[in-house]
Image (cartoon, rainbow, N blue to C red):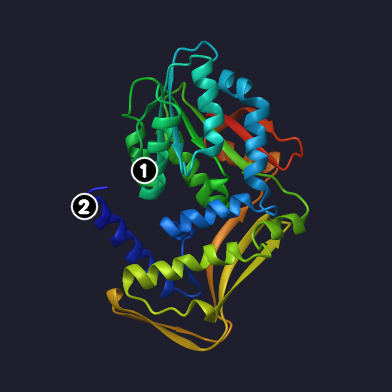
């Protein structure tokens, strides 16, 4: 990342932190959990027995990889595989291996907000799949969408795994899907993961593990404010709290102040006052069923062509095309 890009991301971080901590109620975006420390914490989360999501989607790829690729490009004419929020690429590597084995002409474009994640993934793929054409990009989803139309003249498959769509409430999810739609040519596809509704305790446990890794992951946004913006958050003065509404399918994460306190953020010339038990909303993790996903697609000018699920039916990946 060049210094200009680094400055843009730093400015974005400071701007959104200022907006979130001066709002009522307070909030911070979960996208800022991620830096080198946050990436490692999320790797640990994905290994936790409570966090079923990664294994469920990995199971889908292992069970259905051949059919998934046929749904993308049955005639092997070639396409660009664009992954938003690529992370470490663990699940995607199952598809990439199958792509190479079956000789699909493809260029893989992993995109992530984390420079650390993209650099690590690109370097790793160069060693693991030296014959694969990889072009990594750093940036936020909505900033990258405008560039998607111009990557090449080939068919595009836009892939969003890990239930990233679940970080958005329905109105913003529709907005996101509409922007994806606007970036698509008529034969382009979207391949997207949606965590399914299930026993409420299963959901709560996934975001509130007993070992405290998820709590540390949420608190990493405060640690980043301290490190990058000159804050003085006392991380021990906040607890992580998770709630889940089975009616709406919305899980929410909070950091709750255990006492009345004031936090200074020098780079923003900002003092933030907290009452005892006041919260900062940090994350939304939406859960779905087929009816909800069909509704989201219809509202966004899309339609579902296929779906794939794991053996426990915890999770589904849907293929979307433009509505005719």
Is 13 rendered above or below residue 134?
Answer: below
| Percent of width and height locating residue 211 | 65, 65
Comparing labels 2 and 1, the label whose residue is closer to the camera:
1
Q: Which mark is residue 75?
A: none
SS for tag 2? helix
Where does label 2 land, which residue?
A: 4
Location of mark 1 (residue): 119
Task: Give coordinates of residue 102: x percent, y percent.
Answer: 53, 15
x then y, percent, for residue 50: 70, 54
Is residue 189 in sight in this rendering? yes
Q: Residue furthest bottom?
A: 260
Residue at the location (33% across, 28% down)?
A: 151
Outermost front residue: 127
Query: Which residue occupies the foreground of this view, 246 or 103?
Result: 103
116 to 232, vertically: above or below: above
Which image quarter: residue 221?
bottom left
């Amino acid at each position: 990342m060049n210094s200009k890009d680094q400055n843009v991301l730093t400015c974005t971080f400071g701007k959104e932190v200022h907006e979130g901590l001066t709002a009522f109620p307070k909030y911070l975006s979960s996208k800022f959990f991620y830096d080198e420390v946050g990436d490692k914490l999320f790797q640990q989360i994905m290994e936790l027995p409570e966090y079923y999501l990664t294994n469920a989607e990995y199971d889908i790829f292992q069970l259905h990889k051949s059919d998934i690729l046929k749904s993308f490009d049955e005639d092997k004419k070639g396409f660009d595989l664009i992954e938003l929020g690529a992370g470490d690429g663990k699940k995607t590597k199952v598809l990439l291996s199958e792509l190479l084995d079956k000789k699909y002409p493809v260029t893989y474009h992993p995109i992530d907000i984390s420079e650390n994640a993209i650099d690590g993934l690109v370097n790793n793929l160069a060693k693991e799949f030296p014959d694969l054409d990889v072009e990594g990009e750093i940036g936020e989803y909505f900033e990258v969408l405008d560039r998607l139309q111009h990557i090449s003249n080939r068919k595009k498959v836009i892939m969003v795994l890990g239930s990233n769509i679940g970080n958005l409430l329905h109105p913003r999810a529709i907005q996101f899907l509409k922007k994806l739609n606007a970036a698509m040519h008529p034969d382009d596809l979207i391949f997207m993961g949606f965590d399914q509704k299930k026993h409420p305790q299963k959901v709560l446990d996934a975001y509130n593990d007993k070992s405290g890794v998820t709590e540390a992951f949420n608190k990493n946004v405060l640690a980043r404010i301290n490190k990058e913006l000159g804050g003085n958050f006392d991380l021990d003065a906040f607890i992580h709290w998770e709630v889940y509404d089975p009616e709406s399918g919305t899980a929410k994460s909070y950091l709750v102040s255990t006492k009345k306190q004031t936090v200074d953020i020098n780079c923003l010339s900002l003092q933030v006052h907290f009452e005892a038990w006041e919260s900062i909303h940090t994350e939304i993790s939406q859960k779905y069923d087929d009816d909800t996903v069909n509704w989201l697609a219809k509202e966004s000018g899309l339609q579902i062509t296929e779906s794939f699920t794991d053996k426990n039916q915890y999770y589904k990946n849907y293929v979307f095309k433009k509505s005719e």
